[in-house]
């Protein structure tokens, strides 16, 4: 009898579970930053966008002679700011590739979080982000894929940094943490408003 009672009540339990309202996510932006280290961003970095980008010199053409474009392009941006004396950083990255068969792959990355500056290093502590992949005219996997960043994508990253002037314009040089002599820049960013 107990087995029959359980089987008979099981659909009712499923119905009640399906009808119960889930609590809306009430996490605020400040909640994400609550336990994340931050320091003030130096004035020379705050306020604008630091951009690094490239285009390759190789171009492809359709058989009718129409220029298809470069086979590789990439861009990265940092936007530093201070909110109530605490450093914030937004990071964007784009990578686009095109093969001679016109297969286009585009990869977009966005992360934001806090930043800590200590002398010649800064540590970026991402708290959220997302990824988007677009494939077009490829033999398989065409379409758009979206993915939210998970814990493994949001690990802190440390760079050494310095500002160098090139033809009177400031450039942000970033280096691997081990490059104490600043000999091999990872990326060089120009300042834009």
Image (spheres, rainbow, N blue to C red):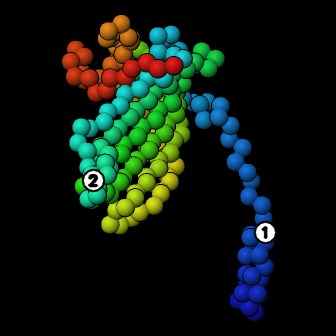
Task: Give residue 121's quadrant in the image.
Answer: top left
Note whether 143 is above or below 123 in the view shown: below
Image coordinates for residue 147, horizontal then vertical, percent? 50, 52
Quick check: 4 left or right of 46? Answer: right
Residue behind mark 1: 19
Note whether 110 is above or below 145 in the view shown: above
Determine the residue positioned at 45% across, 42% down. Answer: 109
Quick check: 81 left or right of 31? Answer: left
Task: Give residue 59's quadrant in the image.
Answer: top left
Image coordinates for residue 111, horizontal then vertical, percent? 49, 37
Residue behind mark 2: 65
Front one among 144 and 87: 144
- Quadrant where the N terminus lies? bottom right
Quick check: 24 left or right of 145? Answer: right
Determine if residue 87 is in view: no
Image coordinates for residue 108, horizontal then vertical, percent? 44, 44
Front one among 134 and 120: 134
Q: Label 1 crowding class (10 Å Cα cut-off): few <14, some 14-19, many 20+?
A: few
Determine the residue positioned at 39% across, 20% down. Answer: 190
Secondary structure beneath disc 1? helix
Quick check: 13 left or right of 175? Answer: right
Front one among 125 and 69: 69
Image coordinates for residue 192, horizontal then vertical, percent? 47, 20
- Separation of disc 1 and disc 2 at Cα? 61 Å
Secondary structure beneath disc 2? loop
Determine the residue positioned at 32% across, 33% down. Answer: 54
Determine if residue 164 is in view: yes
Q: Earlier in the sequence, mark 1 or mark 2?
A: 1
Q: Label 2 crowding class (10 Å Cα cut-off): few <14, some 14-19, many 20+?
A: few
């Amino acid at each position: 009898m107990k087995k029959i009672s359980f089987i008979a009540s099981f659909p009712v339990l499923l119905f009640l579970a399906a009808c119960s309202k889930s609590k809306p996510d009430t996490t605020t932006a400040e909640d994400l930053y609550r336990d994340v280290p931050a320091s003030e961003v130096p004035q020379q970095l705050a306020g604008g966008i630091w951009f690094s980008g490239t285009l390759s010199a190789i171009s492809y053409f359709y058989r009718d002679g129409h220029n298809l474009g470069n086979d590789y392009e990439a861009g990265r941006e940092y936007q530093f700011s201070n909110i109530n004396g605490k450093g914030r950083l937004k990071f964007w990255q784009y990578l686009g590739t095109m093969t001679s068969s016109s297969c286009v792959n585009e990869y977009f990355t966005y992360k934001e979080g806090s930043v800590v500056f200590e002398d010649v290093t800064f540590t970026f502590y991402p708290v959220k982000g997302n990824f988007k992949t677009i494939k077009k005219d490829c033999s398989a996997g065409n379409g758009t894929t979206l993915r939210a960043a998970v814990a493994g994508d949001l690990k802190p990253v440390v760079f050494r940094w310095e500002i160098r002037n090139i033809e009177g314009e400031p450039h942000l040089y970033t280096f691997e943490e081990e490059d104490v002599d600043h000999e091999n820049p990872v990326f060089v960013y120009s300042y834009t408003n």
